[in-house]
């Protein structure tokens, strides 16, 4: 079974055979579909700028339903995670994509460095902040932390023409705190400081603001040094909690 991404990578993935994924997807589509709210779906789609259709499930309801779907299912292996994620992403409604992100977050320790191309496909397909940011901080970040050799992939991602891939590179260290590679963090911010898109400029400020919780003086010094290159939005976000 093949899945071709509509994102910028153009990579084709074969969905692994997985009886676990068969069970999860059968339960998932039945459970989510039975509780869809078409009226709420209209407003949810509008809020997310028509990135995808919605079923109309609120986040609290969706999480309760997801627990029901996964009740008594086995712990997945990497192939199962790949199958669940790709099959969910092939469905049109956004809540299935959210389920996949949550599933990968829950089982990120089961994933090897070889899973990174799958995350690249997910980031670059039906892209918007609601899935990209969670994949960046909780899945890509976890993969890179577990295998530092993937830092070289992040060095390539920060150069990518796809703004969501570049945003992922910026945000992948969001939860690293004291283990943050500050040289890379600051270099990535400088590399994309002139980016014209709001979501990249915002990500620069966000990752700096988050690291400022760990080392505010380093962030102040960086912003002072690079203020001429950083966008005003990035500067405001970076210094929001610590001041100039």
Image: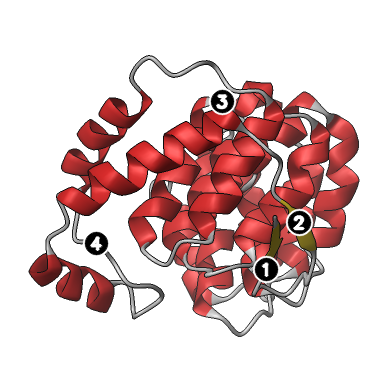
Q: Label 3, label 4: how many angstroms apart (C-alpha)?
A: 25 Å
Near-viewer residue (2 or 204): 2
Judging by the rendered image, the residue that carries numbered circle 2 is 13
Q: Earlier in the sequence, mark 4 or mark 1?
A: 1
Mark 3, residue position? 107
Please give left or right for residue 238 compared with residue 119 in the image: left
Q: Residues within 10 Å of mark 1 (few under 14, many from 20)?
A: many
Q: Which residue is label 4 attached to?
A: 55
Q: Are marks 2 and 4 in contact (CB under 8 Å)?
A: no
Q: Residues within 10 Å of mark 3 (few under 14, many from 20)?
A: some
| N-terminal-most mark, 2 or 4 | 2
* Mark 4 neighbour density, 10 Å: few (under 14) some (14–19) many (20 or more): many
Left or right side of 225 for 133: left
Res. 31 mark: none
Q: Which residue is mark 1?
A: 5
Residue at (65% x, 50% y) in the render:
221
- Residue 14 lies, in percent from the top left, at 76, 52
Q: Separation of disc 3 and disc 1 at Cα?
A: 23 Å
Q: Are marks 1 and 2 in contact (CB under 8 Å)?
A: yes
Disc 2/disc 4 C-alpha distance (Å):
26 Å
């Amino acid at each position: 079974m093949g899945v071709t991404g509509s994102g910028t990578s153009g990579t084709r993935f074969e969905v692994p055979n997985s009886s676990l994924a068969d069970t999860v997807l059968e339960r998932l589509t039945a459970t989510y579909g039975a509780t869809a709210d078409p009226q709420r779906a209209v407003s949810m789609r509008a809020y997310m700028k028509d990135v995808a259709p919605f079923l109309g499930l609120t986040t609290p309801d969706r999480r309760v339903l997801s627990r029901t779907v996964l009740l008594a299912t086995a712990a997945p292996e990497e192939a199962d995670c790949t199958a669940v994620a790709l099959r969910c992403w092939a469905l049109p409604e956004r809540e299935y994509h959210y389920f996949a992100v949550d599933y990968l977050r829950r089982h990120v320790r089961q994933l090897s460095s070889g899973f990174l191309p799958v995350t690249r496909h997910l980031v670059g397909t039906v892209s918007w902040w609601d899935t990209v940011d969670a994949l960046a901080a909780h899945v890509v970040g976890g993969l890179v932390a577990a295998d530092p050799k993937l830092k070289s992939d992040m060095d390539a991602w920060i150069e990518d023409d796809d703004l969501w891939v570049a945003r992922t590179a910026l945000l992948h260290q969001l939860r690293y705190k004291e283990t943050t590679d500050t040289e890379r963090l600051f270099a990535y911010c400088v590399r994309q400081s002139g980016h014209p898109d709001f979501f990249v400029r915002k990500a620069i400020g966000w990752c700096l603001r988050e690291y400022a919780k760990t080392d505010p003086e380093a962030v102040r010094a960086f912003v002072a040094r690079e203020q001429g290159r950083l966008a005003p939005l990035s500067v405001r976000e970076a210094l929001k909690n610590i001041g100039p």
